[in-house]
Image (tube, rainbow, N blue to C red):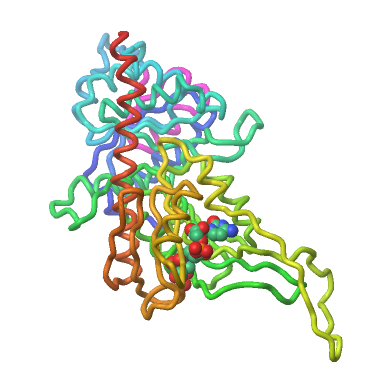
Amino acid sequence: MVIDAQSLAGKRILLGVTGSISAYKSALLVRLFVKAGAEVRVIMTEAASHFIPALTLSTLSHNEVLSSFERAEGGLWNNHVELGLWADLMVIAPATAQTLASAANGLCPNLLLATYLSARCPVVWCPAMDLDMYAHPATVQNLERLQSFGNHVIEAESGELASGLSGQGRLAEPEHILDWVRHFFNVASSKAPTVGLNQDLVGKTVMITAGPTHEAIDPVRFIGNHSTGKMGIAMADAATHLGARVILVLGPTHLRPQSEKVSVILVQSAQDMLAACQQYAHEAHVCIFAAAVADYRVATVAEQKIKKQSGEDFAITLVQNPDIAKTIGNTKRSDQVMIGFALETENLLAYAQGKLRAKNMDMIVLNDAKQQGAGFGADTNIVTFVTENGSTELPLLPKSEVANAILDFASRLLNTKLATQLETHTLPQLLVL
Ligand code: PMT
């Protein structure tokens, strides 16, 4: 990863480290912050010191690491109020379920939590725990509660966990946390917001499918289509500019996103694409299905190259592929936004409306395969946004601008959904309290 040494120059970051096996990653995080020009101070809980020595973090941060209210010598105390006022941003990484629960309930049994309670700066939580703990309603509600206080959350990532299980719960990679922080400060210091766009995808995950699929006939032939992936790739790049963590599930194309921040999952067939989407969809806040997926695949793929039989016609039996958008759409939660595309040549609006409902999408981006400057291969597109509330036609635009318009719609709808969820989940709780 290339780090711009000036990108966090002058920023003061207070890093809170709690007792998780992933606390070792805090060393890399401190190094990345310092390399990017930030001044870093570290507070750790006693439990964290079992996983990473304070000496490592003090050496890397060039500052003493604090962990208790009292100093060992001199009868002095560590002033949590001063620490909270000093910082431009407080990052808690890793944040255990215990610390999240304490913070969500205003408990302050240690210096880290007392500092959190007195901090006036923005706070971002980076949870790390086992997958079942992470998915537990108590943890989910604690994170929602912290967000309702105006705190930010960088979601845990998926992969192998210390327990040996696999799933969502891993501390976000230090590079991803650094990206988030850099973006956060850029947005915060930006005096001129981008016209027509908001920055609400910071800390959110966006999954996008793009490109064609190739359905093998034999080792040398396949059934494919003319998709280049440009439309989906444009959205992946645009989503990173809006601060999102982006997972691009990309069919066979030589094109790649410009942004190194996009995680690209390369796939060949519709079945591969579905498997990748099923792996990541549950952690995505926004799913966009721009791929031109083959509706059919060959029933039996020949193991050897099929040889020409002179004078004879040749027929292939095709079987239906899974509908990826529909499969994932059927699992859509109330805190997710899903957007599909429709590429049509006739009955455009009617077919798009049918797909909106059949695939349980929030919006269909309709494009006409026969229109000049639209659809496959072009650097431009002409699209109509189709929702339950009606349709809106956009003019001929570069695919990058179509991408921005789609993401703008997605982030606004996501905010509405999250706000509604917060009202329904947290208000009754607060009333009971
Ligand atoms: O890649 P480019 O060259 O830039 O071209 C862009 C594009 C034309 C591919 C893009 O703008 C587009 O229209 N993508 C969707 C193409 C398509 O397959 O449309 P559809 O109407 O057949 O499918 C409807 C929706 O269901 C799409 O979101 C599609 O991704 C999804 N689908 C379809 C079939 C299937 N088996 N699984 C799916 O997920």
The picture places residue 26, in percent across and down from the top left corner, at: 44, 35
Q: Quadrant of the C terminus?
A: top left
Question: Closest to the observer: 432 or 363?
Answer: 363
Residue segment shown in magenta: 41-67
Q: Is residue 147 above or below residue 99?
A: below
Q: Is residue 218 left or right of residue 19?
A: right
Q: Is residue 331 above or below residue 309?
A: above
The picture places residue 321, in percent across and down from the top left corner, at: 65, 58
Question: Closest to the observer: 141 or 45?
Answer: 141
The picture places residue 353, in percent across and down from the top left corner, at: 42, 55
Q: Residue furthest bottom?
A: 311
Q: Can residue 41 be seen in this snapshot?
A: no
Instruction: Say which quarter of the image contains residue 139.
Output: top left
Q: Can residue 107 be seen in this snapshot?
A: yes
Q: Is residue 340 above or below residue 300?
A: above
The verdict on residue 63 being magenta is yes
Identify the residue at image location x=57%, y=73%: 225
The picture places residue 229, in percent across and down from the top left corner, at: 48, 68
Q: How many marks?
A: 0
Q: Is residue 82 left or right of residue 400?
A: left
Identify the residue at image location x=53%, y=23%: 133
Q: Residue furthest left?
A: 191
The verdict on residue 208 being magenta is no
Q: Quadrant of the N terminus?
A: bottom left
Question: Closest to the observer: 31 or 18?
Answer: 18
Identify the residue at image location x=44%, y=52%: 356
Question: Closest to the observer: 57 or 206?
Answer: 206
